[in-house]
Amino acid sequence: MEILLMLLTILAVVLLVIVLVSYLRAIIKLLNSIGGKGDSYLAKLRLGLRAIETETGHLPTEVTKLNAALSDTANGLVVVNENLAGTITAALNQENP
């Protein structure tokens, strides 16, 4: 009886290993189809992301320049606003002597 249980256990372990190996091969095949070759979707995505990185690589330096220019523009608009407020006040004072 013990020999029969031992043989069944060995058979179960061998069957488990066979099933695990077959599923592992299926997973590897699927992963290779996704990103293992140069014409896969993952490779195309990687190429596109590199192109975006190259095209937008100059933005960090340009954004700081743009921020400085926009700050200068904001300061200029504050001066214009003050001048317009003074003009409106002067016009209202001339209207109501």
Image: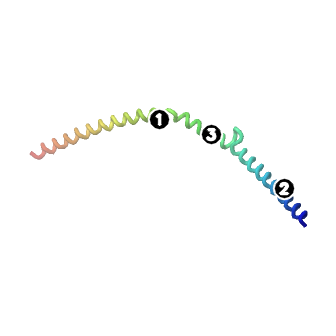
Q: Are marks 3 and 1 in contact (CB under 8 Å)?
A: no
Q: Give the structural element (helix, strand or loop) at label 2.
A: helix
Relative depth, front residue between 4 and 41:
4
Q: Are marks 1 and 2 in contact (CB under 8 Å)?
A: no
Residue 77 as seen in the image, left or right of residue 1:
left
Q: Give the structural element (helix, strand or loop) at label 3.
A: helix
Which residue position is annotated with label 3?
46
Which amino acid, by three-letter code, is at mark 3? Arg
Quadrant in which residue 43 is drawn = top right
Quadrant of the drawing holding the C terminus: top left
Which residue position is annotated with label 1?
60
Relative depth, front residue between 65 and 1:
1
Residue 79 position, x and y percent, is 26, 37
Q: CA distance from mark 2 to mark 3?
A: 41 Å
Which residue position is annotated with label 2?
14
- Which residue in the rendered view is the most extreme toward the front? 2
Relative depth, front residue between 82 and 15:
15
Q: CA distance from mark 3 to mark 1?
A: 22 Å
Residue 33 position, x and y percent, is 72, 45
